[in-house]
Amino acid sequence: MQIVVLDAKTLKMEELDLSPWRALGVLSLYDRTDPALVPQRLRGADVVLTNKVKLSADALKGAAALKMVGVLATGYDVVDVAGARALGIPVCNVPGYATGSVTESVFAFLLEMTRNTAHSTARIRQGAWTACPEFCWWEKTPLALEGRTLGIVGCGAIGSRVAAVGRTFGMEVLGYSRHEHPGFPGTQVSLEELLHRSDVISLHCPATAENAGFVDAETIGKMKDGALLINTARGSLVNEGDVAAALASGKLGGYGADVVSREPIDVHNPLLKAPNCYLTGHSAWATVEGRQRIVDVTAASIRGVLEGQPVNVVN
């Protein structure tokens, strides 16, 4: 069986144990795949695995041997799932592999914004504490999370885990979702109420046509002055120009983003020059443990398809 990986570098697979895949067939790893090369690399493949390389219905039609498409992520919008279904090709994703990793990134952003660790380290190295006549020194006043309100937009698995951690910090937790989530460890309210009451807002909803850019000047205007905003979901949820303006004016006290509207980030993105803006490069999911789970779960999906009992099928 031929297993083809189209963008191995996205997961830095040299750091991972790929033996679960090698045990199932002949593995071909491509660091990156230009769109023009997709049809060629699908030819003869029994299984194709992708993280960010897009697979159109036309490309899939040319892959006569294809038995499965594996998306090396939870989101599967890179694949024409309807086209794959029409061709009888199951598309399998990897749900829940990075719930803990993304949750940790949320609180890395939040603790940096409230405790100012990087700023303090830089200033201390410049001599600011040495020159201080008191034993204790700080420039940016630290903020306590205890007693503050955490609002979570999107109450699924990651949103629920963030809520649970927030509660351990002594935060009141509010949640908003289009659907009820009975297991959510907080109080589910309307979006309007969440915006008005929250000191911190963390985004955990999928990107849809309906919610594109919904965090804009109007939405931000409904938030508390100095509210902190965190986005580890999708860059398209946010109007980045409006967020940058709100940071400049002080309406937003800080913005932590692992995702932006265009990735890799464009040199003209307004967030690059915005104050109190903290950025990571779509890496909240990328712990070694999380990436290894992608390999292991995908191997189980391949075995399931071969045995006629597919799992994690999204189409």
Image (cartoon, rainbow, N blue to C red):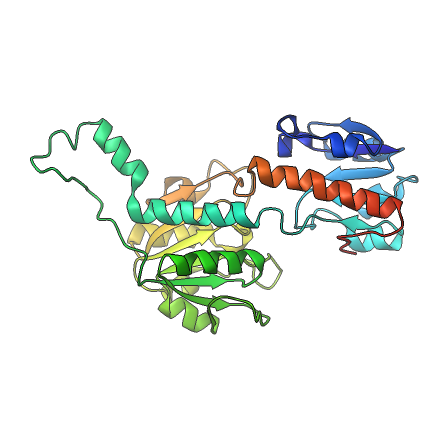
Quarter of the image with the N terminus is: top right
Quarter of the image with the C terminus is: bottom right
| x 49%, y 54%: residue | 238
| 268 and 118: which is toward the camera | 118
> In the image, residue 98 lies at what x, y percent?
58, 46
120 relative position to 9: left or right: left
Q: Which quadrant would residue 246 be assigned to in this image?
A: bottom left
Farthest residue, direction right:
64
Residue 276, compared with residue 37, is above or below; it is below
| x 85%, y 52%: residue | 309
- The answer to whether any part of residue 55 appears in the image is no
| x 42%, y 69%: residue | 194
Residue 96, compared with residue 218, is above or below; it is above
| 241 and 59: which is toward the camera | 59
Farthest residue, direction left:
133
> In the image, residue 122 lies at what x, y percent?
27, 31
| 198 and 213: which is toward the camera | 198
- The answer to whether any part of residue 56 appears in the image is yes
Count the numbered circles shown: 0
> In the image, residue 253 lies at what x, y percent?
32, 53
> In the image, residue 115 lies at what x, y percent?
29, 46
| 215 and 259: which is toward the camera | 259
